[in-house]
Image (tube, coloured by chain):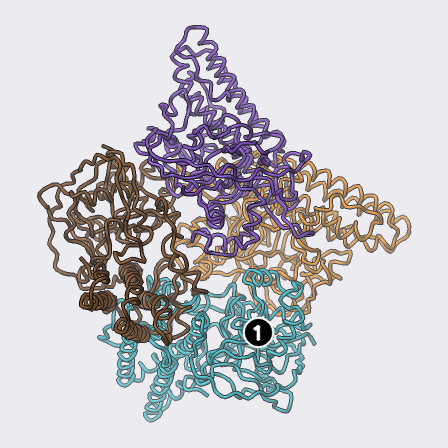
Chain colours: A purple, B brown, C cyan, D orange
Amino acid sequence: MSAALTIEAGFDGGGTRRQSARAALLASYNTVRGLTEALAAPLSPEDQQLQSMPDASPTKWHRAHVTWFFETFILQPHKPGYCAFDEHFSYLFNSYYEAIGARHPRPERGLISRPTAATVTQYRHYVDVAMTDLLDCADDALLVTLAPLIALGLAHEQQHQELLLTDIKHAFSRHPFAPTYQPPPGFTRHDPPPMEFLDFEGGIAEIGHDGPGQTSGDFAFDNEGPRHRVLLHPFRLATRPVTCGEYLEFMADGGYERPDFWLSDGWAMAQREGWQAPLYWSRDPHRDSWQVFTLLGRRAVDPAEPVCHVSFYEAAAYAAWAGKRLPTEAEWEHAAVSGRAEHTGGFLDRQHPHPRALLDGGDAKLRGYGEVWEWTRSGYEPYPGFKPAAGAIGEYNGKFMVGQIVLRGGSCATPHGHIRPSYRNFFPPAARWQFSGIRLAEDL
Amino acid sequence: MSAALTIEAGFDGGGTRRQSARAALLASYNTVRGLTEALAAPLSPEDQQLQSMPDASPTKWHRAHVTWFFETFILQPHKPGYCAFDEHFSYLFNSYYEAIGARHPRPERGLISRPTAATVTQYRHYVDVAMTDLLDCADDALLVTLAPLIALGLAHEQQHQELLLTDIKHAFSRHPFAPTYQPPPGFTRHDPPPMEFLDFEGGIAEIGHDGPGQTSGDFAFDNEGPRHRVLLHPFRLATRPVTCGEYLEFMADGGYERPDFWLSDGWAMAQREGWQAPLYWSRDPHRDSWQVFTLLGRRAVDPAEPVCHVSFYEAAAYAAWAGKRLPTEAEWEHAAVSGRAEHTGGFLDRQHPHPRALLDGGDAKLRGYGEVWEWTRSGYEPYPGFKPAAGAIGEYNGKFMVGQIVLRGGSCATPHGHIRPSYRNFFPPAARWQFSGIRLAEDL
Amino acid sequence: MSAALTIEAGFDGGGTRRQSARAALLASYNTVRGLTEALAAPLSPEDQQLQSMPDASPTKWHRAHVTWFFETFILQPHKPGYCAFDEHFSYLFNSYYEAIGARHPRPERGLISRPTAATVTQYRHYVDVAMTDLLDCADDALLVTLAPLIALGLAHEQQHQELLLTDIKHAFSRHPFAPTYQPPPGFTRHDPPPMEFLDFEGGIAEIGHDGPGQTSGDFAFDNEGPRHRVLLHPFRLATRPVTCGEYLEFMADGGYERPDFWLSDGWAMAQREGWQAPLYWSRDPHRDSWQVFTLLGRRAVDPAEPVCHVSFYEAAAYAAWAGKRLPTEAEWEHAAVSGRAEHTGGFLDRQHPHPRALLDGGDAKLRGYGEVWEWTRSGYEPYPGFKPAAGAIGEYNGKFMVGQIVLRGGSCATPHGHIRPSYRNFFPPAARWQFSGIRLAEDL
Amino acid sequence: MSAALTIEAGFDGGGTRRQSARAALLASYNTVRGLTEALAAPLSPEDQQLQSMPDASPTKWHRAHVTWFFETFILQPHKPGYCAFDEHFSYLFNSYYEAIGARHPRPERGLISRPTAATVTQYRHYVDVAMTDLLDCADDALLVTLAPLIALGLAHEQQHQELLLTDIKHAFSRHPFAPTYQPPPGFTRHDPPPMEFLDFEGGIAEIGHDGPGQTSGDFAFDNEGPRHRVLLHPFRLATRPVTCGEYLEFMADGGYERPDFWLSDGWAMAQREGWQAPLYWSRDPHRDSWQVFTLLGRRAVDPAEPVCHVSFYEAAAYAAWAGKRLPTEAEWEHAAVSGRAEHTGGFLDRQHPHPRALLDGGDAKLRGYGEVWEWTRSGYEPYPGFKPAAGAIGEYNGKFMVGQIVLRGGSCATPHGHIRPSYRNFFPPAARWQFSGIRLAEDL
């Protein structure tokens, strides 16, 4: 389990436990902050400046924005005498918090050459020093106040770590000569295990996070709660995500030419954008086959890998073609905690930010979490009883609850320990630049 | 109860009942078809040619398209020797059925000057004669086959009757001098009853239509089923829709200036489009007040009327401002059949296609159905176990199940008897040109 | 010579000549006004409602706008007690006169269903009666004032007659089934005469109109003057316009695939719009050949006809391919009055609004005027000493003198007698919906 | 006179002169190439990555593109065994030469993070070494061949030096906090001399460059010739450009609110874009006055400076307001060589890339060249007898000869010695990001 999920231990104990809690907080902080810099390390100042579409942000912006979050929500309210590194940064690096004031328009983040990447490095260091100092000097009461805010700040930074990778991948894909983020490793192919379906009886189940939400130690985002009862109809869920090989069969069977598989909006989008394959796939000009652009370079599509960079529309069309459907998010969560799911492997490996083919695990269990996010059939809506937190912090999740689809499961770009079974990721149905794939379901 | 809902009676009885079933079918057919022509009667050939936005269609197109539906799905497969009125019409008047073949692009319907409105009248007559003839000569087996198809065709035509009104209203609103569809009636103001909230305990409930769907006699659209159990959390529902007067308070309190009430997509849309009030409202240039454009002309906003022509975004912002929320569609349907709802009044009055102020009904009951469609908090998704019908007919509903919000309740432009409590209307969250309003809910 | 050009005769003579001048004015008025209605006669109210692009206007609008011109600039200032037909029309039917006040946005003319075409007919009749009455009762002084204004009004209406045809042609071309304006006549092919080049020595020449401009009897538009001296370098001009057959050779030689023939803006436009042939040309789906949409229906391209509906960009590319160039407007005008040009044939024939193939005329003369407008190599700029007239009338021409290219010569949609050798037509270089063709030139 | 204009001296002399010619060529090369690097020196790698609109390019791209020009047109054809620095660069750094092959889309130049600015520095050095080596070893015949190509390459690089400055100025202006290119110098105000008008009699004059064009030593671009006779009508020309103070009077008199001063396209553009002042002007939020963004920071508008960053549309509107007009390019060139023009001062000063206020020169002469480019009333068209050069080099100028307006005179960003009186600069009429101003003319 990750550092980020354990920081909350022990604030009710004695002095020793208190010190170890303080130390654990600091360790979590340093681990997460250090990973951001490690992820940016292979990128030049020019790379860090790139913004290739309005939905994506420059690396430099991600690095500064997550830092601004600590400065704005922790250092300024809680560290007496704290002086902002640069008063302009609040305008430049606020993402969408209307309550904090004016902010720079998102599609123009790529026009901010100043501060430079080097200055952002100094900014991060400046804030890290102040945070360390704040934690060192905090008394117990303050630690209890800070712990959940730091947990939120670190969870937030982890989200941006994933975006940092998906955004630079998109930017590099627009370069005509396929730059690499990491040199590719050696590569051995093997066959994936067969896709099987596990049965679930349904009935009344509980889903959602039962903790006190983002202001508590047992961290979860506010959108994951309240924990509540749902009524599930009997269903079956596939033991693993759909592979590229299976997706190639869909394509070969006219998947992108036959409107009867598609939702109407999806078909219109596919026609308008000329979709013929997942994002980052291209025809090999020399052979009758498909290549895929990855952060490790461009290479042949591996049929054994989970397919990714598909939109919800493509996922739903694939499911219709396969005679199945996508799971609801309640089905997904219920299955994930059923004891029939195996949560080994997966998640971010900096040396290999790309989904890996599954090995055959022997018995029939739900596997493959942490390789690709899995589109569900559920729109992103508030759970019964959901209320956003008051103030700027409350803008975190609730205001996005329309026009988006829930994804579950985590990807090869998701930092270890960032997520839980109750975690609700969400993107618009046309989004393809995340590591998003497909797990099939059907009625029992 | 409307003719359209009773056509199915009696196909298992003896000869007399058979004749009366045949007569009932024909009567329903004539009633619905006649209403379309009555709705178009105040409109000149030039009016019928107008298309003021890609989402709307010319009156002439609506009149021809619903006729093409009977020609394509009933006369051509079931009437031996039937000869199409004009073979070009299949291309011109197919709306979105991919299975039927190529079709004219929707945004260019306003460029089709030929056939003229007069020719469309002939087309309608030609099809009506053939339909009457088909029904007259059909044996029992054929009648059993035809009845559900006719029910679908008539329900379909009723949907387009509502669109005919909302589309011509939008077109007229673009004319600088506010043309009228009907001369305005005399107008007496009165105060609406107070808004109260009724409590519902929740628990396991059943919603959805239990009939065999659109191929059966007890007509419902396929998207209304299957009937299924849902788990409802305790909730409260307002006795009537929000009025213009209440909405003016929201506006006066900065409703359109304060992002904290809004969903993020809604705020962005409101800023981009410069929304300051519901669609069709404008400031009176001579007084400090608001006017509204209606099919009966432009006049002062009546505070007692239900507010309408608001988007889902505005409905949700209003609810947030009011400290309430929108109901889910399951809550809405459960309440509508609870015995605490009064379904009198409302729906289409050709002489007055505009929502009317509610009269005080005395006791606390759910009222106001049939004045404005009510936005719910539910995305338009398939019910558990839903499967679209095979073939072109199956394109009716399922393929739109993403990116849309469910509305319930019916409006002043909805033909009598067209809908049921299980009826699911749906539009994108930014749509404003329907007669769409707001009913509040909250957790109990 | 047309009626419009002779109205000015005789205002300095005695009573008889005065009466004949009055009669001539009225005859011109009736002739031109009648032609507009004759041109609109084949069009239904729905046809007259069409606006297929922002640059084009509905037939009904043209009919009303030219009438508004007489009402605004002649009847209202000069007819005591004249009461406007409808006070709204000034807003609806002002084209671009900023000095007259607000006006309806051009791209939304197609949304004006009211007034109907029938009401516009009444409007025209109302104004015609008032104009006839004004002319009947005018004394000599008033006649002298009115004559040039009427000349301008009629010249203006003639311009809109051409636009009426080119605009409805564009609208019909957007209909999937190629409606016709007139039934096609019988059709006999013949070969065009060979293209020869006539030499002109150049030197100091005079061009432009020497009359007192648009406020005088010898009518010309203000942009045609002042008459002035120009220095011409020796040049040669083709005896006839380029034919479709010759243009097909350009296409077959990769004319639309080779950027070296094209101006940079033209190449970008051709790529963006996917131009492969002149506007209205389409591939015959059944044979390996080209069809052309005309006001007389769709038929095979006739190689002998002058090519038309090409943009300036295409004309310039063709000339580059042919190793020639386009003439300047000074060269064109100098040649047209040189005595080596034959001005027979051509111009509007209501029964055949399409360019006709040239017959061989025997000797080498400049021929083909009045079939297609001829793109020149000259931007539309003010002549030396040009000053726009004061007031709204002055908005006629001068304010368009940037971003446009001069065309000379007149087309099969230009009314007889509307133009002179000094006439300067102008359109943006990408415009294709006029009857615009190509005459080649080269340095001597 | 600049180095670039003297490189051609002496190829017909003996050995010594030959050596000095070789040395002069090399000196010119080093001077021009060095200036580019000096101009880029204040810019970080991130600054050099910026592209703020499709018309502008990143600094890094300019630095690489001008280098690619030498590699492609000189080193590859003329240096045996030359090996390209990176074969990808031909795709990345070709600007618009269709004959050279595919190229990277212009609006996406800002997405090319690789090569980095540092790699571009290496590229420039690599090419400089090869060019020096080529010149050192060239025999006389090769020198004669190379000299005009080098002259073209250097003139080309000088054009991009101006664009480098105008493009980074535009990019910086999009940053919310007004970064500076250079720290601002001290600033002393003084009054400009009065505007007077000098008379010119007109008649037959010669304009254009008489040299053998771009393949000769006496360098000029191909579009400047052939030298030819023109007929000038008598005219007057202002002694200096319009100042900001005079332009403020135009603004105060409703210049941006009154359509009667404007060309129609200009008025539409000004309305659409919301123009209220020249580009880079903004209202001082604290005082009722105007500020201007410059490469030296943001400061108050100086009324004595020449106004700049106005479009042709604004220049023409100003002239109409002033009761004058803009000069034709023939008038301008004739006056510039008349002996009544003073060509001192002006042009690029790296420490002060902004127009300076004119000092009073005493007698009435044409002054102010080299502060702002001066919009003429002439469309950019080929001179009589103009023929583009064959091959890729011929794409330099001719293919842009439509839709553009000629500017004359040079600006504070134009390198010394880059231009001549026959120099024809050109931009579309809406362009504002060049240092473009206004000199008035009128008929005599």
- Tell me the quadrant of the picture where the C terminus of chain C can be found: bottom right
Give neighbour class at mark 1: few <14, some 14-19, many 20+ (Cα, 10 Å). Answer: many
As drawn, the residue found furthest toward the top would be: A15
Q: Which residue is mark 1?
A: C329
Image x and y of residue C226, in percent? 50, 74
The answer to whether residue B105 is visible is: yes
Image x and y of residue D56, in percent? 58, 48
Q: Is residue C362 left or right of residue A91?
A: right
* Residue C330: quarter of image: bottom right
User: In the rendered structure, which amino acid carries the disc numbered 1?
Assistant: Glu
Image x and y of residue B169, in percent? 27, 60
Q: B276 or D226, which lies in front?
A: B276
As drawn, the residue found furthest toward the front would be: B14
Label 1 chain ID = C
Q: Is residue C179 left or right of residue D232?
A: left
Judged from the image, the secondary structure of the residue bearing numbered disc 1 is helix
The answer to whether residue C393 is visible is: no
As drawn, the residue found furthest toward the bottom would be: C16
Q: Is residue A162 left or right of residue B53?
A: right
Q: Is residue A222 left or right of residue A130?
A: left
Residue drawn at x 43%, y 49% is: D276
Q: A364 or C147, which lies in front?
A: A364
Q: C414 or A265, which lies in front?
A: A265
